[in-house]
Image (cartoon, helix red, strand yellow):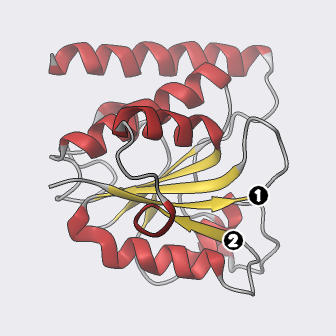
Amino acid sequence: MTGGYTITVTMENEKEIYDFVVFFADEDQKIANEIYSFLESDEHGLHGYCKYRDGELGGYVIEQIMDVVQESKKIILLMSKNSVNEGNFNFCSVASVTEAIKRNVRKVIPVVLDLSPTDPEIPDYIQILRCIQYSHGYEKQLLKCFGKNISVSAAETCAMKPLTIDQPKKEENILSKKLSHKFFSSLLKKS
C-alpha cells in the first residue's frame, strides 16, 4: 500500500511553487481526485499536477515528498481509517507539520473522512490543528482555506478551519513553541 498525491502549480514565490498538495492512502484516491477536480476546475482557476500523470519515475520517494512539502503553500491531509495506519502517509503528515512549524505558517489542512477530528487514531500533532470534516459543504470550507471569496452561512463560518499563524507576533511564537513541543512529544511517544 503506497500513498499518492496531487499537486497544483502556481508561480508566486520562488520557494512555494505549488498551491497545494493532497496526501492520501490509495483507498481514498476517489475522494482525492474529487478534491483535485474541484480545485482545478475553471471556476477556481487552479492548475493541477498529478503524481501518476506528471511525477518523476525512478526518483527517491522521500526526496520527492520533502520537495513537494517545502514547495507547497497548503498541504491537504486526507485523514481516514486507511491513511492513519499507512507508513508513507504518516511520513507525509509528519513532514508537513514539521515544515509548517519550522516556517511558522498556516499550511496544513486536515480533511477528516471516516473518523472524528478527535479520534484517538488521529495523531496528536494533527489533532491540535483545526480540521475540515468531509461532509456536505466541505468544499466551501476548503476554499476559505485558500482565501477564495465565497459566501457562506453563519453555521459554515463557524465550522473548523486550519490553525492560522500568518503574521508572527509574540503570542504566535509562543503558540509555535507549544505546537512544536506537543508535536515532537507525540513522536517520541510512538517510538
The spot of residue 123 in percent (x, y) is: 28, 36
Q: Are marks 2 and 1 in contact (CB under 8 Å)?
A: yes
Label annotation for residue 90 = none
Q: Is residue 25 above or below residue 93?
A: below
Question: Could you tell me residue 153's position as x and y percent?
Answer: 68, 80
Mark 2 or mark 1: name the one nearer the start of the chain: 1
Is residue 44 depicted above or below 189 in this figure?
Answer: below
Please rate how many residues cluster around mark 1, counting C-alpha atoms within 10 Å: few if below 14, some from 14 to 19, many from 20. some
- Name the foreground residue: 166 vs 48: 48
Rendered residue at 43%/12% (across/down): 181
Relative side of 67 to 30, left or right: right
* Residue on which the image places disc 2: 47
Which residue is the site of mark 1? 10
What amino acid type should be assigned to the residue bearing mark 2? Answer: His
Identify whether 82 is placed above or below 92: below
Quadrant position of residue 127: top left
With 162 as the anchor, is 180 left or right in this view?
A: left
Question: Which amino acid does the dot numbered 1 rest on?
Answer: Thr
Q: Residue at x 67, y 52 (%)?
A: 18
Q: Residue at x 60, y 34 (%)?
A: 70
* Residue 114 shows in this picture: no
Circle 1: element type? loop
Cα distance, mark 2 to mark 1? 7 Å
Q: Measuring 38% from the left and 31% from the top, which residue is drawn there?
A: 94
Q: Quadrant of residue 28?
A: bottom left
Quarter of the image that includes the C terminus? top left
Residue most toward the front? 58
Residue 119 percent across, percent down from the top left: 23, 49
Q: Position of residue 85 (x, y in %)?
A: 15, 46
Disc 2 is placed on an element classified as strand
